[in-house]
């Protein structure tokens, strides 16, 4: 039972580089979310999607883009990485808006 | 904007001690409330949730939480903690049906000393 799978688990980038984080869920959930977790800040929502082909901004969307071309996948892109984007990124999915979210194992991203 | 406050940043307890972690939310309308736990190096897992009905909610691993609407609170409790409860605990709130977003508190780190 895979649930929510994130790839990669770790990555180190140089400032200005771009990369894409992949989130895949096998629970047929409609809603998917990207969060970042920073010490003492809790989880902050970056972007979310309420269904295939839809995306919306969360609390801290600047510097990130997302795409939901397939229901099971939600991609998070960093166009030009900055040190302030060093964080642990979590993807989550849920069946509907008021159902519990299921989280992936996280991606630890360091920007040098 | 909705906010969630967790009063304690770090709580240290001995095994068998009782636990209460505070959580207050700011939203005044219908609200869904959650407690998640994150064990070291792992992802967040749902401990319990409140949508409506009995304000005393029981979750996994002996945890419970009480929703007190008049105090905008949803405190997490456990009568007797174990070393394996060492983790970070996050309270989260969503503004009722149709809300796509959860607001998380900043988390409370619990350390249980054997």
Image: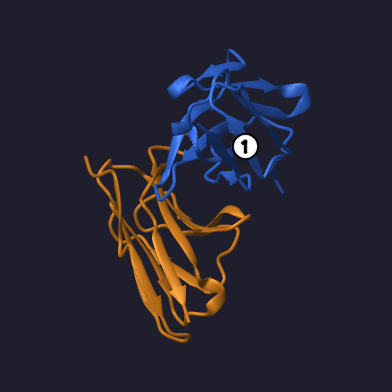
Chain colours: A orange, B blue
Residue at screen point 61% across, 21% down: B18
Tally of marks: 1
- Is residue B113 in view? yes
Using the image as rendered, state which of residue A81 and residue A29 is in the foreground.
A81
Local SS, label 1: strand
Most extreme residue toward the left is A1
Most extreme residue toward the right is B70
Q: Is residue B83 above or below residue B6?
A: above
Residue at screen point 57% across, 38% down: B110
At which x and y percent is residue B38? Answer: 47, 43
Badge 1: residue crowd in 10 Å (few <14, some 14–19, many ≥20)? few
At which x and y percent is residue B72? Answer: 74, 29
At which x and y percent is residue B23? Answer: 68, 34
Look at mark 1 in the image and give the residue it sits on.
B12
Q: Chain of mark 1?
A: B
- Is residue B97 in view? no
Q: Using residue B76 as the reference point, say whether residue A34 is left or right of it.
A: left
């Amino acid at each position: 039972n895979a649930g929510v799978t994130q790839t990669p688990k770790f990555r180190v980038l140089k400032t200005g580089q771009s990369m894409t984080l992949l989130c895949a869920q096998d629970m047929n959930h409609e809603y998917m979310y990207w969060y970042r977790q920073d010490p003492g800040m809790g989880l902050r929502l970056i972007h979310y999607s309420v269904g295939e082909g839809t995306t919306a901004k969360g609390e801290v969307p600047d510097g990130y883009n997302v795409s939901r071309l397939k229901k099971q996948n939600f991609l998070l892109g960093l166009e030009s990485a900055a040190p302030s984007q060093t964080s642990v990124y979590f993807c989550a999915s849920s069946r509907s808006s008021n159902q519990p979210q299921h989280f992936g194992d996280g991606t630890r991203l360091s920007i040098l | 904007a909705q906010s969630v406050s967790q009063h304690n940043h770090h709580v240290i307890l001995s095994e068998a001690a009782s636990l209460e972690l505070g959580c207050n939310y700011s939203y005044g309308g219908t609200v869904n409330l959650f407690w998640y736990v994150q064990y070291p190096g792992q992802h967040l897992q749902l401990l319990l949730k409140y949508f409506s009905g009995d304000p005393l909610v029981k979750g996994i691993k002996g945890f419970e939480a009480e929703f007190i609407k008049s105090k905008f609170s949803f405190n997490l409790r456990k009568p007797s903690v174990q070393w394996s409860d060492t983790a970070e605990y996050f309270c989260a709130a969503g503004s009722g049906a149709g809300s796509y977003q959860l607001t998380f508190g900043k988390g409370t780190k619990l350390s249980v000393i054997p």
